[in-house]
Amino acid sequence: MAWACVLLPSLALDGALRNRPPLDTPFALVSGPVQQRRLVAVNAAARAAGLHPGQRLATAQAICRDLATAGHDPHQLAANLALIAAWAYRFSAEVALAPPRAIVLEAGKSLGLFGPWPRFAGRLRQELAGLGFRHQIALAPNPCAAKVLAGVHDGACVPGASALERALADIPITRAGLPPAAADALPGMGVRTLGQLLALPRAALQRRFGAALITTLEQLLGQQPAPFTPYRPPDHFVGRIEWPFGVTNHTTLLFPLRRLLGDLAACVAARDSGVQQFSVRFEHEHAAPTDLTIGLLAPQREAAALFDIAKLRLERTALPHPVIALGVRAATLPPFVPTGHDLFDTRPANAIPWEQLRERLRARLGEHAVHRLAADPDPRPERASAYDTPASPGDPPPLPPRPTWLLERPIPLRGPTPHILAGPERLETGWWDGGDIRRDYYIVEIGNGQRAWAFCPPGERTGWMLHGWFA
């Protein structure tokens, strides 16, 4: 087996920055009591200004007056890690959380589908960059070794167990994920690398540091199962972004809306499902939230299509108060069946699929402005089709041939008596709703050779009425 580890060294900071438009000004996450708030993480601009994690907020603001801050939320950190796990579930059925800032996935079975490891790793990096997370990736025969290697050697690839001990030999003790007591004591004893540690007798190490150190070493070598929690994608999606000021401009809301819908698309893709209905909530500081429910005619899972529909709906929605938080929720994620495509697609290059155009029209014109035509089991020709007719139990009974062009209402058939090709088909129906009809329908040929659909009173062949034309 081969396990890949995706380490996210700046998960908290990236989780906050990805929900904002790109920043080139100092920004920091802060935490702690009101009078003793300290910096938890800083971006490159803040670091260039002389700020660093652990610094008091008051000192940082004195050094950098234009410093922008946001509160550090540990719950959001866990939510972002779960998002990355949901994204990784697209590539492997075995994904595990390795808190606080890593996930691991079994990659050996995926190489046959996504190509050799360099190509697969390149795809992982490209999509992680699109999600807005900085990352380090490594491949090893077991998940514990992959996590350690990712933290020290980004891009490391150890294909087999035979080369694992050599790859781990140069790892510093302080970065090997050992129990804290052992990691603190071993360098003072002259043991500074994993290679030196692995060369020592296990029994002596256990007497000195306990069984926890031996268990950790055996997990690194793949001799014991990894302690990570397997991940299973949820059957719903909830996402929320909050900011410390009110937003009144619809355009400003588009960036966080796009980000949340991108996360929704990643979640449904991980489950190989879609989303047919989701809600967008705009929270206000001193008023009830504004809810926008978006329903689709068929499940979708493309982030661009979901954003296009939500954007059009947002443009038609009046927000009565400034927005301080934005949320997206999908309670159910139904199965997704991809639309079939022709092998030789003749559509213009810029044409959009019919399903996407249909949803765009509904979002622009209103849910009840676009209809679809459906068959109706009513035997009366005038009522054989309807708009948005719900599916009836079972399929309607098969009918004899029907014309391709049905007239809005029957008209008298003039001229000589037509030549009968087929019939009669008798219709006696509609007595229950006042629309009673009694007709004998025939397929006939008139003088100029056209085939028509006409009827006359039952048992008679006079008083012909034309009701449709066959192609």
Image: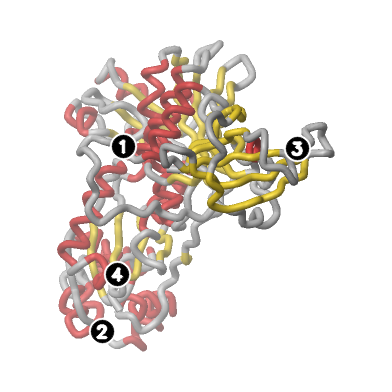
Q: In the visual, does 35 lie left or right of 332?
A: left
Q: Do the residues labelled 1 and 2 touch (CB within 8 Å)?
A: no
Disc 2 target residue: 200
Between discs 1 and 2, the one toward the N terminus: 2
Disc 1 target residue: 352
View extreme (front): residue: 416
The amino acid type, in three-letter code, at marker 3 is Ile
Residue 437: which disc?
3
Disc 4 target residue: 110
Q: Are marks 2 and 3 in contact (CB under 8 Å)?
A: no
Q: Residues within 10 Å of mark 4 (few under 14, many from 20)?
A: some
Q: Please identify the quarter of the rendering in which residue 117 is found.
A: bottom left
Q: How far apart are marks 2 and 4 (CA)?
A: 37 Å
Between discs 1 and 3, the one toward the N terminus: 1
Q: Which residue is drawn at 39% across and 29% down?
A: 256
Q: Of tags 2 and 4, which is closer to the observer? A: 4
Q: Distance between the residues labelled 1 and 3?
A: 45 Å
